Amino acid sequence: MEVVPRKTTIREVAQAAAVGVGTISRVLNSSSQVSRETRERVLETIRRLGFRPNAQARRILKRRAEMVCFLLSNRDFLHPFHARILQGVESYASGLKQHVLFAALHYSPRTPPDRIDLPPVLQEHGLIDGLILAGTIYPNLLRKIESIHMPFVAFSNNVVGMSDEQQFDQVGFDDFNGTLHATRYLIGKGHRQIVFAAGDISYPWLRRRFEGYRQGMRENKLKAVLIAARSPQSFVDFGQKSIGRILSRQPRPTAAVAGNDEIAYGLWRSLQRHAMKVPDDISLVGFDDREEALLMDPPLSTVRVHKEEIGETCMKMLLERLHHPRMTFSHRILPTEFVIRGTVRHL
Amino acid sequence: MEVVPRKTTIREVAQAAAVGVGTISRVLNSSSQVSRETRERVLETIRRLGFRPNAQARRILKRRAEMVCFLLSNRDFLHPFHARILQGVESYASGLKQHVLFAALHYSPRTPPDRIDLPPVLQEHGLIDGLILAGTIYPNLLRKIESIHMPFVAFSNNVVGMSDEQQFDQVGFDDFNGTLHATRYLIGKGHRQIVFAAGDISYPWLRRRFEGYRQGMRENKLKAVLIAARSPQSFVDFGQKSIGRILSRQPRPTAAVAGNDEIAYGLWRSLQRHAMKVPDDISLVGFDDREEALLMDPPLSTVRVHKEEIGETCMKMLLERLHHPRMTFSHRILPTEFVIRGTVRHL
DNA sequence: CTGAAAGCGCTTACAG
DNA sequence: CTGAAAGCGCTTACAG
């Protein structure tokens, strides 16, 4: 392999084009104050020399890194859900020539803010302009990030234990109306005995989903029934194990709203095993529109969350914050959408 | 919100600690040439002022960005498979205070190298030190990247149409021995009529998996049978549609090696629909150990690919390349592992 | 061991 | 419109 050649600098380009370095810089930054001939001569020289400007030097003067960090906290793994959000961040960012750094963080909600060990990106400054927080967000992390004056936007469906005064930019999606619409849809199809299979209701988003379902039942004078369990192994597991509790109820439920698609998948798999059919024996509705929804047979009717849009909106909001640091904080809640597929029977 | 305060610079720290800026820099870079008292006084001042050095300025002098880019090409979405590789890259990188930028690229194999539109990261220099290529890799992209002298490592299971002289660093996993071991396992369990359900064999990795299966059959004097289709809609779809072709064969196969877990999932789902059971009616083996493997019932016996390890190895190899630019190219093939779960019956 | 100075590769008033 | 100069926030010989 040939030795990596020393990179061409702006000075060499200036010399080759017989202009000052300032002129090269002006061409690069597409300043209007350059004559057409000069600009073209410079552009040609740049092409000929294969010159690519040094990003660091520019940044130091611009005081902008043109880079943000997508920080995923307390996740053992970048699940498809967050992967899609990241994708949304990246595609919106790259259109604006902004870059996206990926970093992961593990921390406990009980660690005092000043003892949280931030990832390397946040130990220097100038590397990134701002932060998009995804994963589980506790108050101590927020406090820590505020203490280093790093602008941020949080994907907020997993914000836990925050007081109402806590002000910051956030983007979320509409858990409540998601289950509300799903429940109304079931009722519209003639269902009256509908249960909510929740898993562990202590998650704030599951709580909101339950409330949406409850609202739907209440406005139709129907009784809400919560199927929960304390700390199940996994959502799929909870779904599998709770089908018995659902089907043995009197009167027997004709439909179940699952807290998410994984629970719905667990319910379905368990039904399969007992040679029961969806939606013939029971109708099923999920939440999230994950991969699992299409792996089911028939495919699951579920509440779609627009994950890429969440990412885009986070990025957009962060950029606004960077340009207007004193802007008041905003909290955007993106709509969810009920997707009709094959798991609901018309009674 | 308070105005973001102007960042503290090394000069201010120097003044506050009553030393020269060079000394601050030496402390920061943990040079040994600083006396204990001075170092401690400086460290204390840094803490008191909340000083975090400017990353850009350091980089410009060090000629190292301490950042690499994970470039995902020609994927509509960051699937769990690549997400796990990214995770491996990030966790290994962050331990070494290296940063990971995520970028996506779409290009055609027929675009001439000089007309490929590289993502913004690669249009400047100094932003990243090197590249980890994932996704589909055609010769024109490689040529383009070599033309800008950017060091890179490729995750190579999807390298397409490369001539043998093409030399570059690559990390892959062992497709051939994966199916070979799976096939031997089936034969060890008494199976003789075993088919390979491949989907579209034109993918190089599927080809290698088929060859591994064929080798296993040949060494036991058994006849290899390939179930393929020209351009199926999806792997799951192919699996669903080809179960009929498999079961109608004479003599009837007792086992199928699927080209990947998605195909296995499709086969399973189709069997379910016809009230047939795995492994009672037919044994099944997959490849990749994706999420789908555990979503099946019983869970799928499959060939595990260590995705995080691939990411780690890519990062490690790239770092070696950066430190030794003239090192000869290497091609590491990581072992795969056959995971026994519930889909193979002992005949 | 430490300070003062030169320099990294750019941008941006300043002066013409 | 353009060049020469100062400067961004650091690192690193150089000299003591």
Image (cartoon, coloured by chain):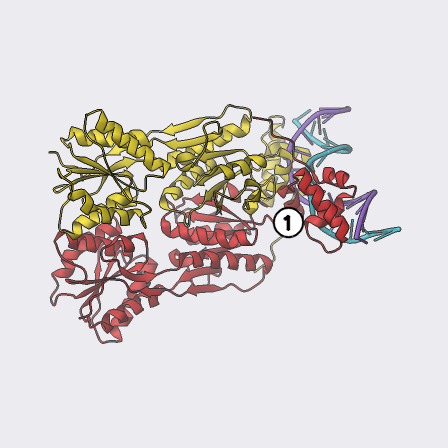
Chain colours: A red, B yellow, C cyan, D purple
The image shows a total of numbered marks equal to 1
Q: Quadrant of residue B33?
A: top right
Question: Can the viewer see residue A116?
Answer: no
**Quick one: B132 or B140, which is closer to the camera?**
B140
**Quick one: A203 or A38, which is closer to the camera?**
A38
Chain of the residue displaying label 1: A
Question: Can the viewer see residue B113?
Answer: yes
Q: Is residue C5 left or right of residue A137?
A: right
Q: Is residue B210 left or right of residue B271?
A: right
Q: Residue A209 location in percent, x, y?
A: 31, 63
Which residue occupies 55% across, 52% down?
A: A149
Q: Residue A307 location in percent, x, y?
A: 40, 57
Q: Is residue B294 left or right of residue A47?
A: left
Which residue occupies 70% across, 44% down?
A: A44
Quadrant containing the C terminus of chain A is bottom left
Crowd around label 1: few <14 · some 14–19 · many ≥20 (10 Å):
few
Q: Secondary structure at mark 1?
A: loop
Quadrant containing the N terminus of chain A is top right
**Quick one: B103 or A165, which is closer to the camera?**
B103
Above or below, comparing residue A66 to residue A335 in the picture: above
Q: Residue A113 location in percent, x, y?
A: 46, 48
Residue under numbered circle 1: A63
Which residue occupies 39% across, 32% down?
A: B172
Q: Amino acid at mark 1?
A: Arg
Q: Residue B37 location in percent, x, y?
A: 61, 30
**Quick one: B12 or B329, which is closer to the camera?**
B329
Which residue occupies 29% across, 71% down?
A: A215
